[in-house]
Image (cartoon, helix red, strand yellow):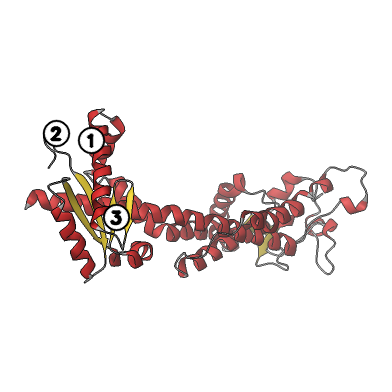
Amino acid sequence: MRDNEEQLIVTVTLYHRSDDPQTRIVEDDLASLQALTPHRVVKINVETDPILKERYYRSCPVVEVGPYLVKSPFKKTDLIATLGATYDRLKQMHETNDKKHIKRKQQGSRLTGFDRFSFWFSKWYMLVFNMMVLFYVGLPFLAPVLVKNGHEGAARVIYAIYRPFCHQLAFRSWFLFGEQPYYPRELADIPGVLTYEEVTGNDSTDLNKGREVIGNEDLGYKVALCERDIALYGSLLLFGIVFMLTGRKIKVLPWYLWVFLGIVPIGLDGGSQLFGFFGWDLPGWMIRESTPFLRTLTGSLFGLTTAWYLYPMIEETMRDTRVILSKKIASVNQLIQEKTS
């Protein structure tokens, strides 16, 4: 042990496999270095967690000391150098009364409720996300069901909840229990279907009236989310389920594919409709109204590519969180055992 210094303890995390003879060799080497550099060893079996197993199994035993990670195969001299460097770094922070180091040390010695929640959430976040999206995209379908069964007051609560998040224009929404599943503007020029103007008598440029229309026994009743939003969140949910069932191993979609397949189509299809409300004297090709098919297609592409781009990146963050908290949980549990033994 180093003389004339307040004893500082280096924490060594040893990631290992079950029944691996190399682990015992590393433990013996570390024990022989205790007099040179005081340390405590926290053992973590990587087979207890799929993320740890994926990250460290083939490299076991793996020794983590401070910012240093030593993967097998390595020599005793590598342990000496790593322990020494970490000890010197720890000593310097101790002597300078580094506030960040003191705070990390205090936080590392106890498990908080937030730690436990974060560890749980890092494992089950996709289930949480999928349930939230399912609820968000599913509840609007309850509104027409409620109206159909005589509970218009309850249905209007749902319409009111979603109004800040969706335009709810009747000519861009799905209808249930009616003659047609949708009633487009005349400008959409869809053959063989009744238009919004025909069935309501309203001017389709009057957006306030378009939002107020809920439907009736003949038309059916409006879903509380528009066609595009249903496609967007539905595809987000679909990808989320697939991502979860495949073990969250799908790689991130390149950003340029997200832009060209997701953002550009929905921007063009949605933005190009705006000229149809201004009443300007414009060439005919500039005035258009999208169709339920195009809204569904572009909404689905945007939802799918957005999920494909974001979920794998979130997974990387959650994996790092799992590894950090697994180490902290093992360390704190060992400290508790040492105090009670």
Cα–Cα gap, marks 1 and 3: 26 Å
Identify the mark at residue 326; answer none if there is no mark: 3
Q: Which of disc 2 and disc 1 is earlier in sequence? A: 2
Along the viewing direction, whichever of 214 and 301 lies nearer the viewer: 301
Count residues near mark 3 (Cα–Cα under 10 Å), then give few for <14, some for 14-19, many for 20+.
some
- 251 vs 79, left or right, is right
Give the residue furthest to the bottom.
19
- Mark 1: amino acid: Lys
Q: Position of residue 325 (x, y in %)?
A: 31, 52
**What residue does disc 2 label?**
5
Residue at 23% x, 54% y is 330
Give the residue furthest to the top.
96
Q: What SS does tag 3 mark?
A: helix
Q: Which of disc 3 and disc 1 is earlier in sequence? A: 1
Cα–Cα gap, marks 3 and 2: 31 Å
Along the viewing direction, whichever of 252 and 113 lies nearer the viewer: 252
Q: What SS does tag 2 mark?
A: loop
- Mark 2: amino acid: Glu
- 111 vs 288, left or right, is left
Q: Position of residue 249 (x, y in %)?
A: 48, 65
Cα–Cα gap, marks 1 and 2: 9 Å
Residue at 42% x, 57% y is 125
Q: Position of residue 27 (x, y in %)?
A: 18, 60
Along the viewing direction, whichever of 213 and 74 lies nearer the viewer: 74
The image shows residue 89, relative to residue 309, as above or below, that is above
- 326 vs 170, left or right, is left
Which image quarter holds the N terminus? top left
**What residue does disc 1 label?**
91
